């Protein structure tokens, strides 16, 4: 299986939505722009957010198996994907790519 690098590209916050809909929480997200993780054998990297993993996992697993070309040519690099986590208040965008 191939190694897959996951890079944090963008972090967005919607404080106006949080103020209206979210209960206050002390700890939210540990991601930082530019931070990278390596998935080996399609497994979740140490320290990677569980919720974000749920979003990126299907793409990481396919890339690890040597597959790609998601959605018929969506990405310039067919062995990559740009996926956001499912946090509606603090979405994080990840660039996922095969690194062998």
Image (spheres, grey):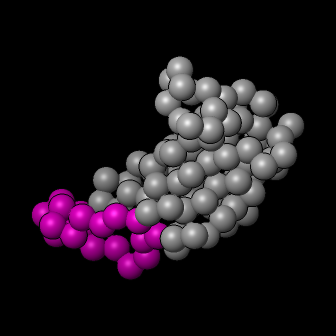
Q: Residue at x 56, y 37 (%)?
A: 76
Q: Position of residue 60 (x, y in %)?
A: 67, 41
Choose between 20 and 61: the one closer to the eye.
Answer: 61
Q: Residue at x 46, y 55 (%)?
A: 93
Q: Residue at x 27, y 73 (%)?
A: 24
The quadrant where residue 68 appears: top right
Q: Position of residue 63 (x, y in %)?
A: 71, 35
* Residue 77 versus residue 33 in the image, above or below: above
Q: Residue at x 54, y 25 (%)?
A: 73
* Residue 17 versus residue 96 in the image, above or below: below
Choose between 16 and 33: the one closer to the eye.
Answer: 33
Choose between 20 and 2: the one closer to the eye.
Answer: 2
**Magenta residues (range):** 11-29
The quadrant where residue 11 appears: bottom left
> Is 20 inside the magenta-drawn segment?
yes
Q: Position of residue 18 (x, y in %)?
A: 22, 65
Q: Is residue 38 left or right of residue 94?
A: right
Q: Position of residue 55 (x, y in %)?
A: 51, 43
Q: Is residue 58 visible?
A: yes
- Total of numbered circles in the picture? 0
Seen as rendered, the residue at the extreme top is 72
* Residue 33 versus residue 75 in the image, above or below: below
> Is 10 inside the magenta-drawn segment?
no
């Amino acid at each position: 299986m191939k190694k897959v690098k996951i890079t944090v590209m963008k972090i967005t916050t919607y404080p106006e939505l949080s103020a209206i809909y979210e209960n206050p929480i002390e700890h939210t997200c540990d991601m930082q722009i530019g931070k990278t993780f390596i998935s080996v054998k399609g497994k979740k990297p140490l320290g990677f957010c569980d919720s974000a993993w749920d979003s990126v996992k299907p793409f990481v697993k396919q890339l690890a198996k040597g597959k790609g070309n998601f959605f018929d040519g969506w990405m310039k690099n067919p062995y990559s994907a740009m996926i956001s986590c499912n946090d509606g208040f603090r979405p994080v965008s990840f660039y996922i790519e095969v690194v062998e």
